[in-house]
Image (spheres, rainbow, N blue to C red):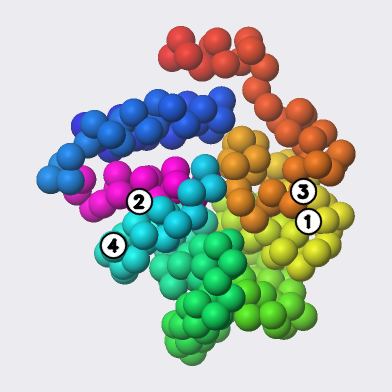
Amino acid sequence: LPFSLINRAQNWLEWTGDLGPLKKVLDSIPPEQDAGQMAARYRYLVAYWEGRFAEALSLLEEAGDDLNASKRAGSEVLPVSSLIAELHALLGHPVQAREHYQRARQVLEEKMRSRPDQPETLAALASALAGLGETEAALALMKRARSLLAPQLDPLRYGEVVLSAAVLQAGAGHPERALDELEHYMALPYSAAVHMLRMAPPLKTLHEHPRFKALLARYTPSDQQLAVKGER
């Protein structure tokens, strides 16, 4: 039952950008009913999306590796240390951020020894390297990750890597390249809803860019589409 309620609230969030129903559902789920820590993971996500980074960090540190927070990136290979590092960076804690990015790098490099051509691992490692200031190496790794996937054969995984590339370009100070990636991403099958891009903290730097505003306008569901969705 909690899973179905969360799933329904998540679908509504993707269509409307409204976090209210999801927050209400999460408030109604006691810890003993949170099998697999799904509610805990979404509590972290809500705090992250709303910019309550200290609270999100506390939730991650409390749950540790037991929390499957990597679902935010659509990939099981993203270490929790990467997410903790990002939150420290957003909170203005460069020393702690670097420490956790370095941990994530070690975990991901170890994974690469057994599976050197796993695109998601390469993309995650690229993000960790970017956090460590190794931008050129990060961009090269992301390019390699993308080359290993065919959009026609595996559009979901390909899209995840394209979205990671957009985040990387935005963080590297290349807004036009980031927007190129986002426009390509939104044109793919199975891309995330446009509201998820609006809420993503790494893309906040693009919010005032005319191309980003146009992207939101182009893919935001109309009132008629929302009405049909609400009837289902």
- Lower position in the chain sequence, tag 1 or tag 4: 4
| Majority secondary structure of magenta residues | helix
Could you give the CA–CA distance between mark 2 and mark 3, rounded to whole angstroms? 26 Å
Quarter of the image for the C terminus: give it: top left
Q: Tag 4's secondary structure? A: helix
Q: Tag 3's secondary structure? A: helix
- In the image, what residue type sits under mark 4? Ala
**Badge 1 density bin: few <14, some 14–19, many ≥20, Cα 10 Å:** many
Tell whether position 139 is magenta.
no
- In the image, what residue type sits under mark 1? Ala
Q: Tag 1's secondary structure? A: helix
What residue is drawn where x is 76% and y is 68%? 172
- Lower position in the chain sequence, tag 2 or tag 4: 2
Find disc 1 in the rendering and name its residue: 178
Report the front residue among 155 and 18: 18
- In the image, what residue type sits under mark 2? Arg
- Lower position in the chain sequence, tag 3 or tag 1: 1
**Marks 2 and 4 close (CB-CB < 8 Å):** yes
Q: Residue 63 bears which disc, if any?
A: 4
Magenta span of residues: 34-49
**Marks 3 and 1 close (CB-CB < 8 Å):** yes
Could you give the CA–CA distance between mark 3 and mark 1, rounded to whole angstroms? 9 Å
Find disc 3 in the rendering and name its residue: 206
- Lower position in the chain sequence, tag 3 or tag 4: 4
What residue is drawn where x is 60% and y is 42%? 199
Image coordinates of residue 193 in percent, x first then y, are: 60, 36
